[in-house]
Amino acid sequence: MNAPTYNFAYLDEQTKRMIRRAILKAIAIPGYQVPFASREMPMPYGWGTGGVQVTAAILGPKDVLKVIDQGSDDTTNAISIRKFFAKTAGVETTTSTDAATVIQTRHRIPEAPLRAGQVLVYQVPIPEPLRFLEPRETETRRMHALAEYGLMHVKLYEDIARFGHIATSYAYPVKVNARYVMDPSPTPKFDNPKMDNCPALQLFGAGREKRIYAIPPYTPVVSLDFEDHPFTRYKFDAPCALCGAEESYLDEIVTDDKGSRMFVCSDTDYCEGRQAAGHRGVESAAPHKEAANG
Amino acid sequence: MAAMTIELQPGFADKVLSAQSTFRTVMEAMARPGQAMPVLDVVDGPSSMMAGVAALALTLLDQDTPVWLDHAFASAPDVGAWLKFHTGAPIVARPDAATFALIAKPASLPDLASFALGTPEYPDRSTTLIMQVSSLTAGQTFHLRGPGIDGTTALTATIEPCDLFARLSINEALFPRGVDMILVDGRSLVAIPRTTRLASSGV
């Protein structure tokens, strides 16, 4: 007798059909949150159950899957999701943005430009951009129906009144195709311009909140702002300490308990690619050598 | 009633992977409106049903999706039985109760407002129309624009009714409510989601 195996990509076929229908409606109505019957997955909420379900519904045997967590291919979350699909779907996995056909991401958009034919799947914790302003789902539904987004502008204005600038630095609200205000998931606002007119398809899955939404390729995505306080990207004012990149999003790494720190690219694939091409930062180490025992 | 035995046509040879590859085709089509995409894993469905429509039905329909058939499909002896056997989708008489509408002869397409258009709060609760058209390679050229299209794209097709895009202007008037459409010629698909607009048309 054969040992029991998983269905291809874990989910049963009826669940995949339900998710696939939601994805088609999400693409047809850019930025609108389509409810779906989210399943329990073999990982806790907050670990990307929404993104995993979207990936499972679209993934095929010819796909090459990349998973990143805060830009890194090497964190527990990214590795475990890659292993999950390698085991249940047998797909090839990669850390290269360029080689991937499906990229599941938590909280970053890769630095390397995406191309047509690629699919970027976002893990989303709270899909409703108005949720912290209006807790009732019935009300936020109506606000989206009426395109009544004044409250969001008040929130950004209160930032300016309190801090002198729009202090929202991640999950920065965007307007998709001049209609729906959408939460881009907790990506840094540095990444917001990459969503605009992107050649790749962008899908968003929120498992706990049971919502799927999408940005089709070549769709206008505008970060909300004011004429006198235009949207600005934000990054640490330093080059990457390992590859010297000036234009990438940086993580701050505390290196000791005396206040020393270094800034490195959050996108590990981008940083390693630059280092392999010969770019060096101020703290580029010589090739790693094991210390002699004793 | 005289018993009539109908030899049902088969479904996908590999339910899982054929549905996946067909879904990726229709997802790409929906993400790039106006561009023809080929269905790779086709089945020999009912004789009046194009291979692309049969593959879409097996990929997207199940017991949760009421389906409406136009007169040509509804009166074909094998279509209803084939859909029920392979998908379990309930066949409904009212187009506004349908998640999907399968249309064999779009020349007699009913008024688009008779389908489900969704509500302002839930615009996704709308009918997706799957229509068999005469050609997606020859005929009139339509220049389309909208999300998924880099600038404009040209769709050359022979579509009846010939005023289809004029009828689709309800999508612009009602947005975000509206209907999404998948045009099928043989095994080739073109999607016209509700955001797609006619930039210009010529011969």
Image (cartoon, grey):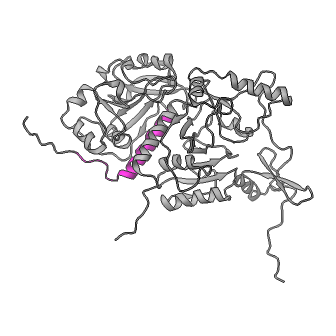
Q: Position of residue B123 (x, y in %)?
A: 49, 26
Query: Which secondary structure class fits the magenta region best?
Result: helix
Residue A141 location, quadrant:
top right
Task: Point out the residue furthest to the right here.
Answer: A258
Side of B11 where A189 appears, left or right: right
At 73% across and 41% down in the image, what residue appears? A188
Give the total number of marks visible in the rendering.
0
| Point 46% across, 44% down: residue | B24
Q: Quadrant of the N terminus of chain A?
A: bottom left
**Image quadrant assignment for residue A183:** top right
**Residue found farthest to the left:** B2
Residue B188 spot, x, y in % from top left:
38, 37
Residue B139 versus residue A227: which sits nearer the camera? A227
The boundaries of the magenta stretch are B9-32
Position of residue B128 in the picture relative to residue A82 (left or right) = left
Along the viewing direction, whichever of A49 and B165 lies nearer the viewer: A49
Name the residue at 32% across, 49% down: B12
Q: Looking at the picture, does residue A163 appear above or below residue A65?
A: above
Q: Quadrant of the C terminus of chain A?
A: bottom right
Relative to B14, does residue A291 appear above or below in the rendering? Answer: below
Q: Is residue B199 visible?
A: no
The answer to whether residue A11 is seen in the rendering is yes
Could you say where residue A257 lies in the image, as x and y percent from the top left?
Answer: 89, 59
- In this rendering, the answer to whether A181 lies above or below A236 is above
